[in-house]
Image: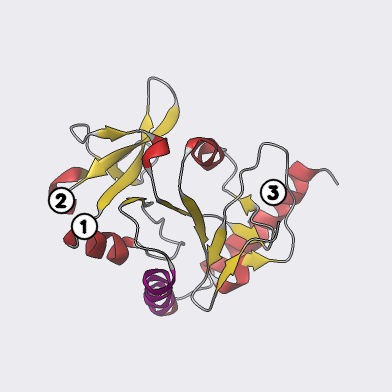
Amino acid sequence: MNVQNSKSDLRAHLRARLEKISDAVRAVESIELCERLQAQIPSAHTILFFAPLPDELDVWPMLEMSLALGVNCALPFFDAEKKIYGAKIIHTLATDIVIGKFGVREPAAGCEEIALNQFDLVLVPGMAFDLSGNRLGRGRGFYDRILAEASGIKCGVCHNFQLLEKIPTEPHDAKVDFIFTPAKGVKRKN
């Protein structure tokens, strides 16, 4: 079986498991994850967050808290002209967030763009991560391109069962430095 097929099979397996998680469990695990991230990551001045999809752990409360503390916070946005993702600074969730091209919350058009090499910390969603820092995304490669350019510490976030011993990878797949789950934080093996 080739790597693409292995990735597709693993994504299908993980999607099935994600669908079985109740909203209540996801809420509790999201709180545990945010508490773990706040306790274990260094004080970052500029953070690239992500807008969680319904089946992902919710890091939005950490974004709200970081904004309240005066941290520079940004979210990815899809640049339709270039067909790539960039990042924009957000200040106020009520006015700076819109629904983007793929149905994901992103910064409004008027928000200031920030270069991807300006971050201290990048929070990264994924279908799965492994102990070597490899990431299995949703299959479009958008985060691989963001991670290739982004500066700072890259932290994958996922449910406990999404942290695996080994996942199938390809040369273009980007790595993260740490993986955080509700139960633990792991530094990648080199």
Which tag, 2 or 1, sits closer to the chain's start?
Answer: 1
**Amino acid bearing label 2:** Thr
Residue range of the region highlighted in magenta in the rendering: 27-40
Above or below for 79 versus 137? above
- Tell me what residue is drawn at x 34 percent, y 62 percent: 43
The Cα atoms of the two marked residues, 1 and 3, are separated by 37 Å
Q: Residues within 10 Å of mark 2 (few under 14, many from 20)?
A: few
Which callout, 2 or 1, points to the residue nearer the camera?
1
Q: Are marks 2 and 1 in contact (CB under 8 Å)?
A: yes
Local secondary structure at mark 3: helix
* Residue nearest the observer in this picture, 43 or 137: 43
The Cα atoms of the two marked residues, 2 and 1, are separated by 8 Å
Q: Are marks 2 and 3 in contact (CB under 8 Å)?
A: no
Q: Mark 1 sits on what residue?
A: 67
- Tell me what residue is drawn at x 73 percent, y 41 percent: 170
Q: Main secondary structure of the magenta part?
A: helix
Q: How crowded is mark 3: few (under 14 residues within 10 Å), some or many (20 or more)?
A: some
* Residue nearest the observer in this picture, 66 or 142: 66
Which callout, 2 or 3, points to the residue nearer the camera?
2
Local secondary structure at mark 2: loop
Say the numbered circle drawn on residue 92.
2
Judged from this view, the residue extending furthest toward the top is: 81
Q: Residue 28 lies in magenta, yes or no?
A: yes
- Residue 44: image quadrant is bottom left
Q: Mark 3 sits on what residue?
A: 8
Which image quadrant: the C terminus?
A: bottom right
**Amino acid bearing label 1:** Leu
Q: Where is residue 54 in the image (x, y as percent from the top left)?
A: 41, 60
Which callout, 1 or 3, points to the residue nearer the camera?
1
The reply to whether residue 62 is in sight is yes
Which tag, 1 or 3, sits closer to the chain's start?
Answer: 3
Q: Residues within 10 Å of mark 1 (few under 14, many from 20)?
A: some
